[in-house]
């Protein structure tokens, strides 16, 4: 908490006026990072004019977020957040919000539940791809290249989905 207060340019008592504990602060960090991710996806996909462009823009925004905010990505999707029930609940809510936003962009003749399941699959692809890209030999993550490859998989995969 001393380091955080110092980085924020406040005293530790001032920090505790806003956050009653380290857990409260970490909860807020998780919520904030999740909100930033969701906002970047929303902005990127809102500007796209076709379904294919939305897929590409969404993945590009996700991978740019990971590249530009690697520590934040690791906080949100790391073991510390997943191994604590309270923190895991926040992460699950963030993932549910992202999947809900993605499901609204999936244009198939299926049901809402069908789109929700597909959206969770797409979110899982993005998270797993990011983890892999960040665990490589130190070569910088290239968000546009990853987005092109993964968007192609998702786009053509979704084009083959049937309503039944």
Image: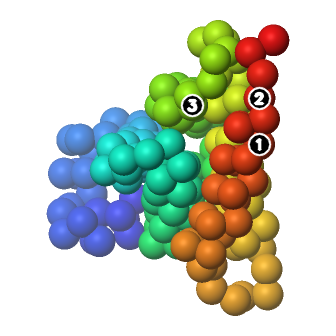
User: Which element carries disc 1, helix, strand or loop?
Assistant: helix
Viewer-nearest residue: 105 or 140: 105
Whether residues under marks 1 and 3 lie with C-beta atoms below 8 angstroms apart, the answer is no
Which residue is tagged 3?
106
Which residue is tagged 2?
161
List x then y, in percent, for residue 162.
78, 22
List x then y, in percent, for residue 48.
37, 50
User: Which element carries disc 2, helix, strand or loop?
Assistant: loop
Disc number placed over residue 157 in the picture, else none: 1
User: Which element carries disc 3, helix, strand or loop?
Assistant: loop
Whether residues under marks 1 and 2 lie with C-beta atoms below 8 angstroms apart, the answer is yes
Give above or below for 99 relative to 131. above
Disc 1 packing (10 Å; few <14; some 14–19; many ≥20): few
Give above or below for 151 relative to 26. below
Kindly report the distance in space between the C-alpha atoms of the residues bearing marks 1 and 3.
Answer: 11 Å
In the picture, measured across the screen, residue 145 lies left or right of residue 15, that is: right
Query: Does label 1 or label 3 sit earlier along the sequence?
Result: 3
Give above or below for 156 relative to 149. above
């Amino acid at each position: 908490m001393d380091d955080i207060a110092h980085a924020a340019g406040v005293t530790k008592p001032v920090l505790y006026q806003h956050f009653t504990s380290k857990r409260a602060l970490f909860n807020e960090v998780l919520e904030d990072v999740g909100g930033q991710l969701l906002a970047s996806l929303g902005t990127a996909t809102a500007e796209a004019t076709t379904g294919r462009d939305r897929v590409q823009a969404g993945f590009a925004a996700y991978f740019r977020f990971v590249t530009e905010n690697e520590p934040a990505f690791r906080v949100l999707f790391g073991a510390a957040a997943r191994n604590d029930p309270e923190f895991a609940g926040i992460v699950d809510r963030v993932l549910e919000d992202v999947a809900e936003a993605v499901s609204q962009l999936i244009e198939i003749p299926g049901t809402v539940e069908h789109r929700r399941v597909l959206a969770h699959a797409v979110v899982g692809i993005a998270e797993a791809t990011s983890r892999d890209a960040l665990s490589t030999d130190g070569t910088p993550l290239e968000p546009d290249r990853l987005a092109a490859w993964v968007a192609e998989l998702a786009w053509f995969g979704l084009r083959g989905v049937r309503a039944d």
